[in-house]
Amino acid sequence: MSKYVKIIIVVVVCLLVGYLSSFVTKEGVITWYPTLKKPFFNPPNSIFAPVWSVLYVCMGIAGGLVWNELDKDKELVKKALFFFVAQLLLNAIWSYLFFGLHNILLALIEIILLWLIIYETYLLFKKINKTAAFLFIPYLAWVAFATVLTISIYILNF
C-alpha cells in the first residue's frame, strides 16, 4: 500500500472520529453549554469546528506518515500507533464526558490524560518521522488551551 493511501485512510478515520463526536457536541452546544459561565478568553463557538477539522487532517497525515515507516522499525511504529489510537479514542471520549454527560470535572481529568497521551505520541513520532511530530505540535497546543479552558469553566461553574 502506498504512503499516500495510508495517509488518506488515517485522515478519513480521524475525520470520522471528529464527525461522530460532533453528534454529542451539537446538542450540548445548543442546550447546555450556553448556560455555563465561561472565561473571557473563551473562543466563539464558530471557531471550534474549523480548528478541529484542520487538527484532524494534520493528525491523520502524521499517523499515515508513521504507519508508512512500519518496515523500518516495526516495534517502535506499532507502539507509536497504539498511542495514536489511544489519543484518538480519548479525544472522542472528552466530547461525550463534557457535552454528553455534562461532567466538567471528569472531562477535566480526562483531558489532562489526553494531553499526556498526545505528548507521548508526539515523542514517539519524533523518533520515527520528524514531519509527523511537527504536525502534532498544533494539536498539543490546542489541547493545552482546551485544558486551561476546561479548568476555567470548572472553576467558574463549581
Image (tube, helix red, strand yellow):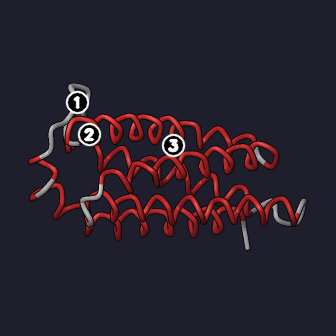
Residue at 82%, 45% in the rendered image: 127
Q: Are marks 3 and 2 in contact (CB under 8 Å)?
A: no
Q: Is residue 75 above or below residue 138?
A: below
Viewer-side label of 1, 3:
1
Chain-order first, disc 2 or disc 1 = 1
Amino acid, disc 3: Tyr
Q: Are marks 1 and 3 in contact (CB under 8 Å)?
A: no
Amino acid bearing label 2: Ile
| Disc 3 target residue | 139
**Distance from label 2 to label 1 (Cα)?**
7 Å
**Residue named by callout 1:** 39
Residue with the mark numbered 2: 153
Comparing labels 3 and 2, the label whose residue is closer to the camera: 2
Residue 120 relative to residue 149: left or right? right
Residues under numbered marks 2 and 1 in contact, where contact means CB atoms less than 8 Å apart: yes
| Three-letter code, disc 1 | Pro
Cα separation between marks 3 and 2: 20 Å
